[in-house]
Image (cartoon, grey):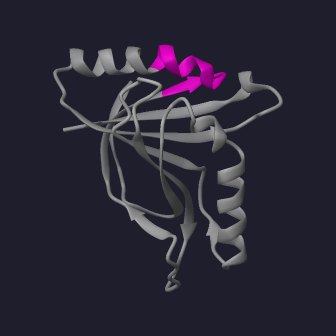
Amino acid sequence: MEFKIIEAQKVFCETVTTTLKDICKLVGDKPAQLMQEAADAGFEIAGPQIWMYKGADGNPDTTFTLTIGIPVTTGERQHEKVKTLPSFSCAAGVMNGPWEQFSEFYPQLIGDVCCQEKSLTGISREVYHVVDFQNPANNVTEVQIGIQ
């Protein structure tokens, strides 16, 4: 785990309300759709997809806000789906392997944060550096827990 501040960044994004139980409906299709829309609008992809969770508490039935963002280079261009993710102070850890491991990884990371006497903000992010649907053991996901 490391503490860091992520700089503000422009993303081509969509925000939805969902639950952990229903989030699998968005995996794969929604990011691909956003990447295609961004490319069609003339934006250059500038990094791996970012999922920002606000209000997720680990309960499969809790409704929360999810923003799925694709970092883009905008220049002077504007678009209704381009937003700026604010700078983000966080504790970050890298999880290698299938996403089913999130249920073990998150409590461990949050426990480490609490041991450092940091306050949680209720916002977390996942940055998907490697996504491999054929062999999930190859996935590399950076989990960022918002702190104050």
Q: Residue at x 73, y 25 (%)?
A: 136
Is residue 37 shown left or right of residue 142?
right
Q: Residue furthest bottom?
A: 76
Q: Residue at x 48, y 36 (%)?
A: 19
> Is residue 110 shown in magenta?
no
| Vertical placement of residue 41 versus 112, above or below | below
Quarter holding the C terminus is top left
Q: Residue at x 65, y 52 (%)?
A: 31
Quarter holding the N terminus is top left
The image shows residue 110 at horizontal and vertical percentages of 33, 21
Question: Based on the displayed image, in which of its 4 quarters is residue 92 positioned?
Answer: top left
The image shows residue 138 at horizontal and vertical percentages of 73, 27
- Tally the marks: 0
Which range of residues does the magenta coloring cover? 94-105
The image shows residue 12 at horizontal and vertical percentages of 55, 65
The image shows residue 14 at horizontal and vertical percentages of 52, 60
> Is residue 103 shown in magenta?
yes
| Vertical placement of residue 140 versus 86, above or below | above
| Vertical placement of residue 104 versus 130, above or below | above
Is residue 116 shown left or right of residue 22?
left
Q: Residue at x 32, y 38 (%)?
A: 90
Q: Residue furthest right?
A: 134
